[in-house]
Amino acid sequence: MRGSIKEIRKKRCYAIEFKRELVRLFEQGKFSVLQLNKLYGVSSQLIYLWVYKYSQFNEKGYRIIEMKKSSTSKISELEQKVKDLERLVGQKQIKIDFLEEMINVAKDELNIDIKKKSSTPQSGVSSTKGKH
């Protein structure tokens, strides 16, 4: 009885708007087929099929060739850029925390209020001084 059990494959049904959106993203060069595959979980073969079917630029008799190495290198470049930006944001946050702590130390220990309030009078230095 076990020998007659078959694996049932689930067939996914995608909306035409979704298919066209993926084709549009590919045509605009925002994502490669490999990137769309990873982002949306749609097979590369299916994406290529949609490109052939819904593309505004694809002519009959022409094949679309995409260099996989270039798309994988583009992914790694983007991942590296994200890491660099995250590191930079972390450094800026550390600097902000340090400066806020310095402001608190100046206020508590030295009685210097660095954060001026709007009611604080302006300094006595005049901008017209020396002009005649």
Image (tube, grey):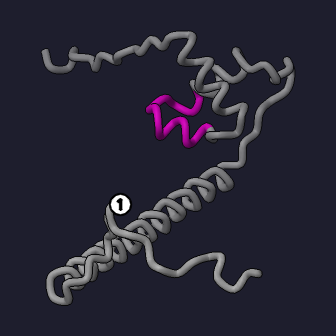
On the image, which quarter does residue 3 sit in?
Answer: top left
Please indicate whether residue 86 sits to the left or right of residue 25 in the image. left
Query: Number of labelled discs?
Result: 1
Q: Position of residue 63 (x, y in %)?
A: 80, 30
Please indicate whether residue 44 sits to the left or right of residue 112 in the image. right
Q: Is residue 114 above or below residue 76?
A: below
Instruction: Give the prevailing secondary structure in the magenta stretch.
Output: helix
Q: Amino acid at mark 1?
A: Ser
Q: Position of residue 131 (x, y in %)?
A: 73, 81
Provide the secondary structure element on which disc 1 rests: loop
Residue depicted at x 51% and y 36% = 37
Residue depicted at x 53% and y 17% = 18
Residue depicted at x 70% and y 16% = 54
Residue depicted at x 35% and y 16% = 10
On the image, which quarter does residue 17 sit in?
Answer: top right
Q: Is residue 72 above or below residue 63?
A: below
Using the image as rendered, state which of residue 42 and residue 106 is in the foreground.
Answer: 106
| Quadrant assignment for the N terminus | top left
Residue occupying the far bottom of the picture: 110
On the image, which quarter does residue 53 sit in?
Answer: top right
Q: Position of residue 94 (x, y in %)?
A: 32, 75
Using the image as rendered, state which of residue 93 and residue 110 is in the foreground.
Answer: 110
Q: Position of residue 46 (x, y in %)?
A: 57, 24
- Mark 1 sits on what residue? 118
Which region of the structure is painted magenta?
Answer: 33-45
Using the image as rendered, state which of residue 12 and residue 74 is in the foreground.
Answer: 74
Q: Is residue 56 above or below residue 41?
A: above
Is residue 38 magenta-colored? yes
